[in-house]
Image: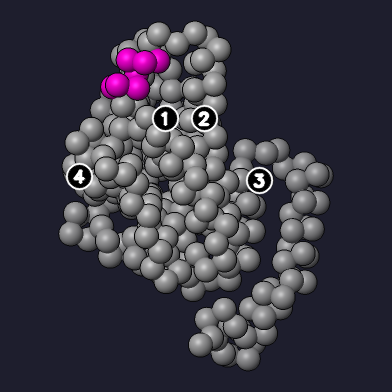
Amino acid sequence: MTALDIRYEGPRATITLCRPEVRNAFNDEVIAALTHAFAEAGAREDVRCIVLAAEGPAFCAGADLHWMRRMADYTRGENVADAARLAAMLRAIYECPRPTIARIQGDVYAGGMGLAAACDMAVAVDSAAFCLSEVKLGLIPATIAPYVIRAMGARAAHRYFLTAERFGAAEALRIGFVHEVVAADALDARVDALAQALAAASPNAVRAGKKLVQDVAGRAIDDALVQATVEGIADIRASAEGKEGVQSFLQKRKPGWLAG
């Protein structure tokens, strides 16, 4: 059985975790497959957005138990190498040049929180539960921390990193970890709406806008940042898509990337 199902349908790529029997927990095989899948989909010019989905009752329960048993006997050097592969996977998702949507149909635990947080957007069913359970095992959510803290904020992370409390979808929405919470029968429609919105926008502007958020978030508003934003808008105004977008608006017609 393959760890992932990867489908390309029009402007959308869907990468689905296919290990429901272990609650879509990941191991070294899944990590390698996800890293490759996001790199491949992100490099395709016909792909306008990528949806990360999962089969079964859980979105992702974190680390696979068999993998954890192997890790228990690792040396420190082996642990560093192993964590580096996980970090590379998360970074591949976070820095993917195409916008990404987490379709959360079930529970999200431990490392699974990192998968969801690394995506640009997250839509969850109202029955989903969330948990950063690492401290219960004497561990910390170190590798996923940069993404989870960006998603939920430092204040919420202070609580949930330390207590390992399980919280529901409403709380995940309140702290900003997910963008929308819907009934199970409305999940696909909301994900589809986001995918359609992304496909309707300028591909170049979406790519640049994603990088803009990553570059600006958390930085001091100093001369260097202000100058970077000035140059950023100047560059995109002068780009072919920037010019086409403005001209199509002024001329009250569809832009070239929607034509045909």
Between the C-alphas of marks 3 and 1, the distance is 33 Å
Task: Classify 79 as above or below 256.
Answer: above
- Please tell me how crowded label 1 is: few (under 14), some (14-19), or many (20+) other residues with Cα within 10 Å: some
Q: Main secondary structure of the magenta part?
A: helix
Image disc number at residue 85: 2
- The residues tagged by marks 1 and 2 sit, at their Cα atoms, a distance apart of 8 Å
Measuring from the top left, give residue 131's x and y in whole percent: 30, 29
Q: Which residue is mark 3?
A: 216
Sequence order check, earlier mark of 2 and 4: 4
* Residue occupied by mark 4: 56
Q: Residues within 10 Å of mark 3 (few under 14, many from 20)?
A: some
- State whether residue 109 appears in this view: no
- State whether residue 189 is above or below residue 121: below
Q: Is residue 139 visible?
A: yes
- Report the quarter where the N terminus lies: top left
Neighbor class of circle 4 (other Cα within 10 Å; few <14, some 14-19, many 20+) is some
Q: Left of 237 or right of it: where is 173?
A: left
Counting residues from the start of the chain, the first of labels 4 and 1 encountered is 1
In primary-sequence order, the first of circles 3 and 4 is 4
Contact, mark 1 vs mark 2 (Cβ under 8 Å) = yes
Q: Secondary structure at mark 3?
A: helix
Residue position for label 1:
28
* Segment colored magenta: 65-71
In space, the residues marked 3 and 4 are separated at their CA atoms by 37 Å
